[in-house]
Image (spheres, rainbow, N blue to C red):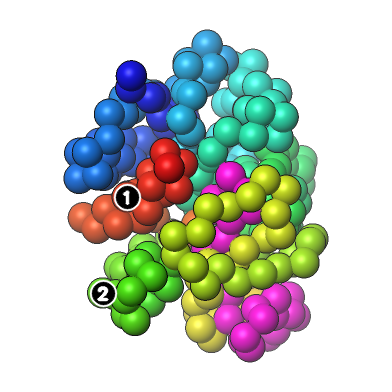
Amino acid sequence: MGLTIGVLAFQGGVIEHMTALKKAAASLQKNVTVIEVRSSAELESCDAGLVIPGGESTHLSRAARECGLLEPLRDYVKAKKRPVWGTCAGLIMLSEEASAVKQDGQELIGGLDVRVHRNHFGRQNESFMTNLDLEFLRSSNESSSPPFPAMFIRAPVVDKLLLPTTKAHDAEATPKEDAAVEVLAILPGRHASNKAAAAGELGSVSPEGAGDIIALRQGKVFGTSFHPELTDDIRIHEWWLQQILS
């Protein structure tokens, strides 16, 4: 019997995520249906998991509120503890706190015990791509893997951990509910145009020195600052499917 994964479809790389998920499911030979989610009924049908794509986080929260979906999303993540992955604005939505928000505040879903800094890397025209060495993509018998091309577009980073952190060394480990925040990837140095970040005023929360946390998970909640769906590399989509379908 097949399972259903949803992609929150208010804005952002909805089609790109759906395409990558379908390719990843085919590659892994998993029977998965991928649907767009704009209502609580569609959300409830997502028994395998949900992706919250990028876009503008205040628009996402406002759209979810207007569609009566904000509280069902919180219930889906926090009470039902279903697997959820947020990219860029999706990561912001899944954080418990956010800094550099607009004057009227920011409604969040929560689920990750972190504070994120919105638009950490500056404006749209300051977007960039960089190759990342993602240890969590390696299998247990691999010492290295090809770099992952990561696209950053007005991306957030984690500027405060609200719970103790661990680092996931086993790429095949299954996350436990109510686990500590696991740091999965750090962007070395400070690439931000944001003056406070560049000056170090936000501090470093990296356990291994200077750098920005750009991928993490806590229990069944996974977040990335960058946009894997905007590349042809489906390894992170494959990894996520393996985590949630195992």
Residue 8: x %, y % from top left: 47, 30
Residue 23 circle label: none
Farthest front residue in view: 141
In front of the other: 42 or 167:
167
* Residue 70 visible in image: no
- Residue 194 inside the magenta-drawn segment: no
Q: Which residue is mark 2?
A: 146
- Residue 200 inside the magenta-drawn segment: yes
Residue 63: x %, y % from top left: 57, 26
The three-letter amino acid code for the residue at tag 2 is Pro
In front of the other: 210 or 34:
34
Above or below 214: residue 28: above
Q: Which residues are magenta?
A: 199-223
Structural distance between the alpha carbons of marks 1 and 2: 15 Å
Of callouts 1 and 2, the N-terminal one: 2
Above or below 97: residue 61: above
Q: Is residue 66 left or right of residue 9?
A: right
Q: Is residue 150 left or right of residue 62?
A: left
Q: Residue at x 21, y 55 (%)?
A: 232
Residue 226: x %, y % from top left: 44, 59
- Secondary structure of the residue carrying tag 1 is helix
* Residue 163 visible in image: yes
- Secondary structure of the residue carrying tag 2 is loop
Residue 238 circle label: 1
Farthest top residue in view: 41
Quadrant into which the C terminus falls: top left
Q: Residue at x 36, y 35 (%)?
A: 14
